């Protein structure tokens, strides 16, 4: 059982001009991450090399995203009730769709299941830490301290790596099961 995270590495990715609203790992490429910010920019990151693979600007106040199951595109929503279909490799939206009703969060961003469903991590807009819990029992495992509130979290799709926001930056930690 995973008692507490054994952090092996941490990565910091910088570049957004406004708060990051949502992050999500590509379900088909474990080292590719997408971030959306209220600065109207969507970024696709190579986490290993700490570089931006693609950037799409001018999308309004973007605040939510969801990957297609095979990682070929993402759907991003903005506060003007518009959805954009974006490719990780194209510099402009594939398509845009104005919604007649309010565009809500496509997926929750302050809590996330681990890739295997065993653990839940929760962030907060008020606290200074990420709370790790066993999903089946609700048992609190530990708190990973952050310097500022971290309302945006996302697990990698097939390993124990977690992306979260802290002090206006996107951070990624890798952990292994067991408290050693």
Image (tube, helix red, strand yellow):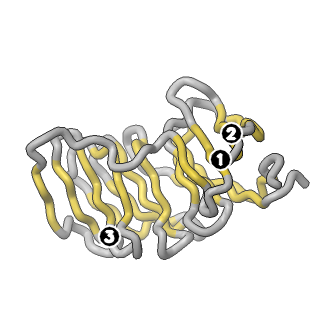
Which secondary structure lies at badge 1?
loop
Q: CA distance from mark 2 to mark 3?
A: 33 Å
Query: Residue 70 placed where, x, y %?
Result: 40, 75
The quarter holding residue 19 reads: top left
Q: Earlier in the sequence, mark 1 or mark 3?
A: 3
Residue 56, placed above or below residue 169: below
Report the quarter where the N terminus lies: bottom right
Given residues 100 and 38, the one toward you in this image is 100
Labels 2, 3: front one: 2
Residue at left 62%, top 47%? 120
How many numbered marks are there? 3
Residue matched to label 3: 73
From this view, report whether residue 176 is shown above or below residue 129: below
How packed is label 1: few (under 14 Cα within 10 Å), some, or many (20 or more)? some
Image quarter hosting the C terminus: bottom right
Residue picked out by circle 2: 138
Q: Residue at x 32, y 41 (%)?
A: 38
């Amino acid at each position: 059982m995973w008692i507490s995270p054994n952090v092996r590495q941490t990565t910091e990715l910088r570049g957004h001009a406004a708060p990051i609203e949502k992050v999500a790992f590509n379900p088909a490429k474990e080292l590719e991450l997408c971030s959306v910010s209220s600065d109207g920019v969507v970024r696709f990151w190579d986490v290993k090399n700490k570089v931006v693979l693609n950037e799409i600007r001018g999308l309004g106040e973007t605040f939510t995203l969801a990957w297609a199951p095979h990682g070929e595109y993402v759907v991003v929503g903005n506060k003007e009730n518009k959805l954009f279909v974006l490719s990780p490799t194209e510099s402009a939206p594939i398509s845009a769709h104005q919604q007649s009703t309010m565009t809500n969060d496509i997926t929750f961003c302050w809590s996330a299941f681990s890739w295997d469903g065993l653990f839940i991590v929760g962030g907060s807009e008020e606290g200074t830490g990420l709370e790790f819990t066993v999903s089946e029992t609700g048992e609190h495992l530990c708190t990973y301290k952050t310097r500022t509130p971290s309302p945006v979290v996302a697990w990698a799709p097939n390993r124990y790596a977690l992306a979260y926001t802290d002090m206006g930056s996107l951070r990624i930690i890798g952990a292994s099961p067991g408290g050693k």
